[in-house]
Amino acid sequence: MTKRIEDSLNKIPILNWLVRLGKQVKIPGLQGMSLYDVIEMYVLGIVKGALTSRAGGIAFSFFMALFPFILFILTLIPYIPIEGFQEDFLVMIEQLLPPNTAETVHDVIEDIANTRYSGLLSFGFIASVFLMTNGVNAILGGFEYSYHVTEMRSIIRQYFISMIMSIMLSLILVATVAIILYFEIGINDLKSKGWLEDDVFWIEKGQFLFFVLLVFFSVSLLYKYGTKEVKYLSFITPGSILTTLLTIVMFKLFSIYVVKFATYNQLYGSIGTLLVLMLFVWLNAIILLLGFELNASISRLRRFHIKE
């Protein structure tokens, strides 16, 4: 795609062979575009797209929207006719948090859960929708500042779409918790009938599967409607698959890091929990942008091919 970059790579002995190999691999659905074209465009977007700066902005806004998001869900719980839903929701939130942070955050979540609001028209609920929308709006803004994105929505339209998407993400989480709750009831029922011996194994595997689906559907929703320019006919995209896989790996590695290597609490005391949580959110923001950049790179390659 870029003659100058390709000429530079051809001067390096090993890389020139990899370039020739990548040009021979054609990716289905890209009208003959090669693997090398996708990788070059992808790396170009990462290098020139100020990825870490955009991730920092997303992480701050998302962190500010985290607890309003929980408040939004807890306000909806009285309208969800499922017994034990609030307990399962709080357990799932704590499981999604990094190790050594759930205990500290638990007090905040319990305080939110015990604060009763008059209903869907209360000031607390409306404020939570506003702050939650700001978090999603920051994510979409991070998408639009990609090196490969040239068209942007108006501020009002962007904010309206962010509000709709934040509500849809909340409903996805609510549906996931409800499905997990019914799944656990079904597993316990099968065990009581003697059809299963180890219910804990199946519950843990089921929770992991639903967690993966939660991440995948949430990310796919953000990628599909996140920008005006990068759109796909299908809901499943290469970027959403990449982000889901990287998120699972990051969760595992970050848990090991926090438990065995991190000493934030020893150095900073209780504020160390916030530092760990901020680092966790920042890494997730980077992974989210990495997946979007892949979709944006493929979208730009398609536009180049149409122009040609």
Image: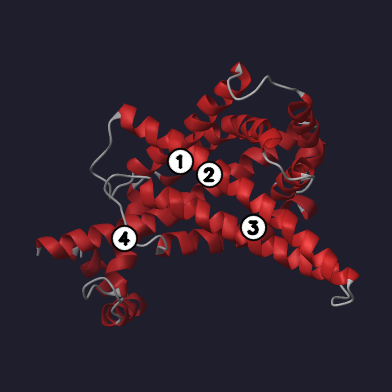
Question: Label 2: which residue?
Answer: 169
From the top left corner, tell me how far across and down residue 230 is, in percent. 30, 52
What kind of residue is marked 4? Leu
Q: Is residue 98 visible?
A: no
Picture residue at 74% right of the left edge, 50% below the top: 95
Disc 4 from disc 1: Cα separation = 18 Å
Where the N terminus falls, by quadrant?
bottom left
Circles 4 and 1, Cβ within 8 Å, touching? The answer is: no
Disc 2 from disc 1: Cα separation = 6 Å
Give the number of the disc on residue 165: 1
Circles 2 and 1, Cβ within 8 Å, touching? The answer is: yes
User: Reading the chain from its start, which is encountered first: label 4 or label 2?
Assistant: 2
Of 243 and 71, the residue lying toward us: 71
Q: Mark 4, mark 3: which one is toward the viewer?
A: 4
Of 172 and 264, the residue lying toward us: 172
Question: Label 3: which residue?
Answer: 211
From the top left corner, tell me how far across and down residue 45 is, in percent. 33, 53
What kind of residue is marked 1? Met
Disc 4 from disc 3: Cα separation = 25 Å
Crowd around label 3: few <14 · some 14–19 · many ≥20 (10 Å): some
